[in-house]
Image (cartoon, grey):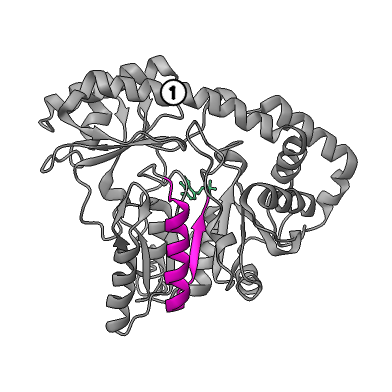
Amino acid sequence: MPEHSRFSFDGLYSKHAPEGRPRGGAGRRGKYDFAVAYPDPKSIPIDGLVSGLQQALSEEGEDLAIYAHPQGYRPLREFVSGKLARERNIHVSADDIILGDGSGQPIHMFLEVLIDPGDVALTEDYVYAGTLGQLRRFGADVRGVECDEDGMLPDALESAIERAASQGKMPKLIYTIPTYQNPQGWTMTLERRQAMVDIANRHGVPILEDDCYVDLRLDGPESPTSIYSLDETGSTMYVASFSKIIAPGMRIGYGTGPAEVLDRALVAKSGGSVNMFASYAVHRYSTDNLDSHIEEINHVQRAKRDAMLSSLGENFGDRAEWSNPHGGLFVWLKMPDGSDITSIRDTVLDKYEVGYLSGVNFSPEGGSGQNYARLCFGFNQPDEIHEGIARLAEAFEAEGAF
Ligand SMILES: Cc1ncc(COP(=O)(O)O)c(C=O)c1O
């Protein structure tokens, strides 16, 4: 056998190739896993999904032989269209909906067709790390806009747009999670939604609305209507997902938006259609069961949220502040100014088996949030949550975070 020297890819990577990260490993997770926004594992409707899948396969399983429509399984798009009309005042047909591999894929598609390197994208001051990562992949200049408990501050949004415009970089996008915001937990009021639309329209900046958590209402008022429905100019794109209401492992989400953007987004969509097995199961299950399932999981999650809040009260007392979310899957914890819970994260995971994500992960500029953590209550059971929060307080104490 001739000896070959190892081939090197140096110099061959595209300009857009990411740095990469090590493969393998089991993925480090804490026994008390407050790091990722998982739904309750025990509430996944396994039997319903299996029987839905079985029913669909017996009715139309032979269609698996053909590559499905690139927008995804039409009956599921019709279901989504009905759900959006009933619940979010979004009136679009199945033709205006693109199913994706989670909602992460539609987000990716929209960013791909809109963002060039250097383009300014405005987001909430702490915001979902997945979208931040994608924006950075596309080279966006991501800028956080100050928020309070009612959402993005209109004045701060307007000034951020004007500042960028004065630098010759009119923002390409406002990305927002208006309901049960990730990670801050607040819901944007109707007035703020309207103000965002007015400002965006006035300056000609499109909005990407991410409604990932809207169904997870635990108490408090219903979410105000969607930003999409308030925008009469057709400059808003909308994404949502079945991940948090059925299971992230199904990888089914969806997006809609202006026709011209959808046409381009569809071309940007990689991988052809969307997994038909998952689409069949989600469609058949959702048709008769989704509403009652959502009620059930919210009941389960309410107890978990309450466990986390009461445990924070018992163990953190007045040494920290935290959100009191009416929905979603997380509590946003603020430790005293100057406290660093970012650098001790790995130690807390290794020694105390408690996982969390530090605020830095959600910081658009990457520089702030050392004293914040997002604590997800979706995965563990209430007694484990109590134990995990007690351990977290013990860890913060021992590692000098108080
Ligand atoms: C705000 C937000 N948007 C989108 C997603 C993507 O989820 P998926 O791709 O599973 O739909 C997440 C996941 O946690 C999220 O928190």
Q: Up-down: is 184 above or below 166?
A: above
Amino acid found under the numbered disc labelled 1 = Lys
The residue pinned by badge 1 equals 304
Q: Is residue 197 magenta?
A: yes
Q: Could you tell me residue 14's position as x and y percent? A: 42, 73
**Image point 60% across, 63% down: which residue?**
270
**Image point 30% across, 25% down: which residue?**
353
Q: Could you tell me residue 306's position as x and y percent? A: 40, 23
Helix, strand, or loop for circle 1? Answer: helix
Q: Nearer the viewer, residue 203 or 119?
A: 203
Magenta residues, start to end: 187-211
**Image point 38% across, 75% down: which residue?**
171
Q: Could you tell me residue 16's position as x and y percent? A: 41, 71
Q: Is residue 190 magenta?
A: yes
Question: In this rendering, would 89 be left or right of 60?
Answer: left
Question: In this rendering, would 347 be left or right of 7?
Answer: left
